[in-house]
Amino acid sequence: MSLNARLEAIRQNLPEHVALCAVSKTKPLALLQEAYNAGQRIFGENRVLEMADKYEVLPKDIQWHMVGHVQTNKVKLMIPFVSLIHAVDSERLFREIDKHAARYDRVVDVLLQVHIAREANKHGFAGHELNVFLDSGTLEACKHVRVRGLMGMATFTDNQAQVRREFATLKQTFDDVKEEWFGSQAHFDTLSMGMSGDYQIAIEEGATLVRIGSSIFGARG
Ligand SMILES: *Cc1c(COP(=O)(O)O)cnc(C)c1O
C-alpha cells in the first residue's frame, strides 16, 4: 500500500471530532512531504532538534506537535514555531515553556502527560501529582502557557482489556480535571491518546487526538 492509501485508510477510521497527528520521527523529509501532499497538516516529532530541522525546510502551514519527553534545555529551540507540546510532565518544564514563550510574546498550547501505563519507564504525572500541580498556582502564574488537555500512553501489551482500562482511566481523569479546573474554559478540549496499535480503542474511550506513526510511514528501523 502507498503512504497515500495508508493515510486514507486511517482517516476513514477517524470520527470527525478526532484529529490525526502523523508521527514522523526518524522519517526522511520526502515522506513528510508526501503526507503533506496528501493533505496531512499535523506532524508529530519526539526530538526537538529533528523537529526544528524539518520545520526549517517544510511548508510553513504545518502544525508541529512535540509528542516526546522534552528536556528543559531544549525548550527554547521550538518555542518560535511549535503548535502543541503533548508531554508536559513537570512543573519545571511547564515554567520553562512559560519563560521562553513570554520572550517570544506567545501563548504556547500544551497537554499534561498523565502516567497511565504499568511500565515505570513511561513519563507523566501520577494521579495525585496531577492534582498537586493543578493546585499549585503554576497555571495562574504562567500566562504564556495554555493547557489544552491531557495526554497518555497505554502499556505496551497485547492485553486489549488492560489498554482499554488505562484509556478509560485517562478519560475519567480528563473529565474530572476539566470540571474542577477548567469548567468554563472551552479551550480545555484535547485528549491525546492512541498510537498505531491501539488508536481504535483510544477513540472508543474518548480520544480527540491520535498520534499515529508506523501505520502511516512504515516501521522505524
Ligand atoms: C512514536 C510515538 C508515537 C507513534 O507510535 P506508532 O506506534 O509508530 O504509531 C505516538 N506517540 C508517541 C509519544 C511516540 O513517541
Image (cartoon, helix red, strand yellow):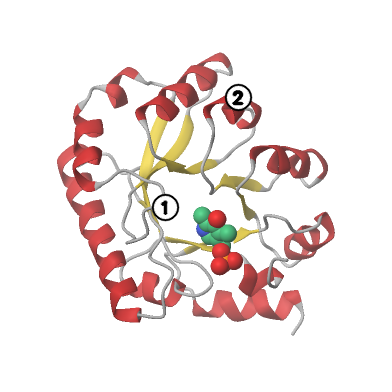
**What is the secondary structure assignment of the residue under circle 2?**
helix
Regarding ligand 1, which quadrant of the image does it lie in?
Answer: bottom right
Decide if residue 103 is in sight here: yes
Residue at the top extreme, as displayed: 103
Residue at horizontal 29 percent and vertical 79 percent from the top: 161
Q: In this picture, is 104 found above or below 55? A: above
Gap between marks 2 and 1 measured at Cα: 24 Å
Decide if residue 184 is in sight here: no
Q: Residues within 10 Å of mark 1 (few under 14, many from 20)?
A: some
In-image side of 79 versus 194 (left or right): right
Q: Residues within 10 Å of mark 2 (few under 14, many from 20)?
A: some
Earlier sequence position, callout 2 versus callout 1: 2
Q: Is the CB of mark 1 within 8 Å of ligand 1?
A: no
Q: Which residue is mark 2?
A: 76
Image location of residue 138, percent across then percent down:
30, 23
Q: In this picture, is 55 found above or below 72? A: below
Residue at horizontal 19 percent and vertical 29 percent from the top: 135
Q: In this picture, is 201 found above or below 221? A: below
Query: What residue type is disc 1 on?
Result: Lys
Residue at horizontal 79 percent and vertical 47 percent from the top: 58
In-image side of 158 versus 218 (left or right): left
**What is the secondary structure assignment of the residue under circle 1?**
loop
Query: Picture quarter containing residue 26?
Result: bottom right
Q: Which residue is mark 1?
A: 122
Residue at horizontal 32 percent and vertical 61 percent from the top: 118
Task: Please tell me which residue lies in front, 108 or 194.
Answer: 194
Image location of residue 71, percent across then percent down:
54, 33
Image location of residue 20, percent across then percent down:
54, 63
Task: Please tell me which residue lies in front, 41 or 165.
Answer: 165
In-image side of 88 versus 63 (left or right): left
